[in-house]
C-alpha cells in the first residue's frame, strides 16, 4: 500500500485513508468478515468505518469532496470498476424514460451488455442518433481521442436527449474542463484506476442536478455490498492527486518529435505505430521489462498518468528508440467490417477454429482485451485481418480456446 499512497501532502486531506490509518493501529480481534482475520485496512462495515451504501462519516465526506472536484451534484465511489458505473447510468436512463441509446460501434462491452440486460434498443451513433432517447459516448477513447462534447451537448439540449459519457480512461481530465466529460454530461463515469493512482477497480460515477436520484437507484442495484476499503481510499486519494504538468509536456514533446509516436487530445495515451510488426515489437519490449496497455496489431498503446515518474518515461523512450530501429514500419492490412446482408437471428450457432472462420458470419461480439471494444460484431462477415489480430493478441474476448461463434448457414 505504501507504493500507492506516496503523496503525504495529499494524504492529509484524504478522509478514508485517515480513518484506516488511525483505526488500523487499534487493538482489534476480528470476528467479522473478511475471512483472513487480519486486522488493519481490509475490513468490513464497522462502527468506525462508515458504510458506502448509506454514508454519513468519512465516506460521505470523501464523496462530497470528489463531487466538488469533478463538478458534480453527486458522485458515487465504485469498487467494481467503470462497468458498474456504465450499467448504473443505463439503468438511470431507462428509469428516466429512455428506450433507446445511440453509441459508437467501438464502445466498451459493458455498454452492449447493459442495453441487452435492460432492454434498451442500441442504435448506431451518429447515423441513428436522431431516433435515440439518449446518447452514450466514450470520451476519451482508448486512443486518447476526445469528442467535440460541446457540440454534442448542444445537440442533446436542442432535441431533449440524455447525454451519458463513459469516461473510463479520462479521470485525470478533470484538470482540463474543456476536455472533461463532467463539464458536458448529465451522468458520467471516471475510471479512476486507469489514469490516476488508484487501485484496480477504483472508479466514480457522477450526475449533475436533476439526475442524482435516478443514478442512485442504479448504483444501489449494480454496486457491490462488499466494497474494498483500500480501493475506496485509493479512489479518494487519486481524484485529489495533483496534476503532473512536467511529464505531460515531456510526453507531448516526444510525440511531436518522433514520427512513429503520437498523442491525441489526451496526453496519457502514447501511440507507437509498428504496423505489421506490432505484435513482434510488443514481445520484444516485454522481454526488456516494458509492458504496454495493449497492442491492437497496428499500434502499441502506452498508458501514462500524473503518477508517472520522469525517469520512467525516459526509460521507455530509450527502449522505444531501439524497437523503432529493430522493427521498421510495414503497412498493415485494414480490418474490413462487412455486415452480412441476411438475417441470421433464427439460425443455429456453432464453434469453429479461428483459421476456419474467415467468410463466416460472427455470432458473438469479439475483440481484443483490452481495450475490450469489438472488432467483429454479431452479423459481421469474418475477415482475415480480424482473425490474424485475434490469433496474435495476448488477450481477447468472444474467442474461447481458439474458437469463435458463427451462425450456421445452411
Image: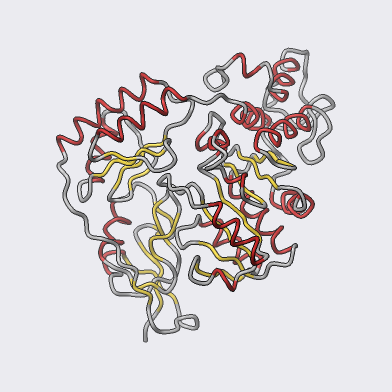
From the viewer's perspective, is residue 90 above or below residue 296? below
- Quarter holding the N terminus is top right
Residue 82 position in % (x across, y down): 58, 46
149 relative to 266 in the view: left or right? right
**What residue do we see at 71% from left, 47% from top?**
208
Residue nearer the viewer, 332 or 383 = 332
Frontmost residue, 63 versus 374: 63
Q: Residue at x 44, y 75 (%)?
A: 349
Q: Is residue 374 above or below residue 35?
A: below
Residue 67, picture quadrant: top right
Identify the residue at horizontal 36%, vertical 18% (top origin): 311
In which quadrant is the C terminus drawn? bottom left
Residue 50 lies, in percent from the top left, at 80, 30
The total of numbered circles placed on residues is: 0
Left or right of 28, for residue 368 = left
Considering only vertical position in the picture, is 133 above or below 77? Answer: below
Amino acid at each position: 500500500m505504501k507504493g500507492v499512497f506516496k503523496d503525504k501532502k495529499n494524504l492529509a486531506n484524504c478522509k478514508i485513508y485517515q480513518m484506516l490509518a488511525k483505526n488500523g493501529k487499534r487493538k482489534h480481534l476480528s470476528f467479522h468478515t473478511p475471512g483472513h482475520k487480519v486486522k488493519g485496512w481490509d475490513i468490513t462495515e464497522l462502527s468506525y468505518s462508515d458504510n458506502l451504501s448509506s454514508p454519513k462519516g468519512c465516506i460521505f465526506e470523501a464523496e462530497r469532496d470528489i463531487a466538488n472536484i469533478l463538478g458534480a451534484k453527486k458522485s458515487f465511489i465504485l469498487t467494481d470498476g467503470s462497468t458498474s458505473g456504465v450499467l448504473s447510468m443505463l439503468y438511470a436512463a431507462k428509469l428516466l424514460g429512455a428506450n433507446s441509446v445511440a453509441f459508437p460501434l467501438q464502445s466498451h462491452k459493458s455498454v452492449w451488455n447493459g442495453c441487452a440486460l435492460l432492454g434498451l434498443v442500441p442504435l448506431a451513433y451518429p447515423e441513428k442518433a436522431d431516433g435515440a432517447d439518449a446518447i452514450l459516448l466514450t470520451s476519451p477513447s482508448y486512443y486518447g481521442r476526445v469528442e467535440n462534447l460541446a457540440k454534442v451537448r448542444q445537440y442533446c439540449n436542442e432535441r431533449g436527449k440524455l447525454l451519458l459519457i463513459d469516461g473510463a480512461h479520462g479521470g485525470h481530465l478533470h484538470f482540463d474542463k474543456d476536455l472533461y466529460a463532467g463539464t458536458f454530461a448529465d451522468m458520467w463515469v471516471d475510471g479512476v484506476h486507469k489514469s490516476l493512482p488508484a487501485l484496480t477497480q477504483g472508479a466514480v460515477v457522477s450526475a449533475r442536478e436533476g439526475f442524482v436520484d435516478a443514478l442512485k437507484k442504479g448504483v444501489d442495484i449494480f454496486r457491490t455490498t462488499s466494497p474494498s476499503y483500500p480501493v475506496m481510499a485509493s479512489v479518494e486519494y487519486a481524484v485529489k492527486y495533483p496534476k503532473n504538468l512536467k511529464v505531460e509536456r515531456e510526453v507531448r514533446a516526444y510525440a511531436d518529435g518522433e514520427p512513429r509516436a503520437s498523442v491525441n487530445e489526451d496526453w496519457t495515451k502514447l501511440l507507437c505505430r509498428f504496423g505489421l510488426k506490432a505484435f513482434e515489437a510488443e514481445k520484444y519490449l516485454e522481454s526488456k521489462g516494458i509492458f504496454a496497455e495493449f497492442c491492437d496489431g497496428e499500434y502499441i498503446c502506452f498508458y501514462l498518468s500524473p503518477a508517472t515518474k520522469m525517469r520512467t518515461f525516459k526509460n521507455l523512450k530509450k527502449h522505444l528508440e531501439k524497437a523503432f530501429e529493430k522493427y521498421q514500419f510495414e503497412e498493415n492490412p485494414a480490418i474490413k467490417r462487412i455486415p452480412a446482408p441476411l438475417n441470421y437471428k433464427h439460425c443455429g450457432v456453432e464453434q469453429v477454429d479461428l483459421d476456419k472462420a474467415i467468410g463466416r458470419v460472427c455470432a458473438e461480439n469479439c475483440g481484443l482485451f483490452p481495450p475490450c471494444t469489438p472488432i467483429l460484431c454479431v452479423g459481421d462477415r469474418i475477415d482475415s485481418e480480424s482473425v490474424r489480430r485475434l490469433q496474435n493478441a495476448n488477450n481477447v474476448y468472444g474467442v474461447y480456446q481458439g474458437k469463435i461463434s458463427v451462425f450456421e448457414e445452411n
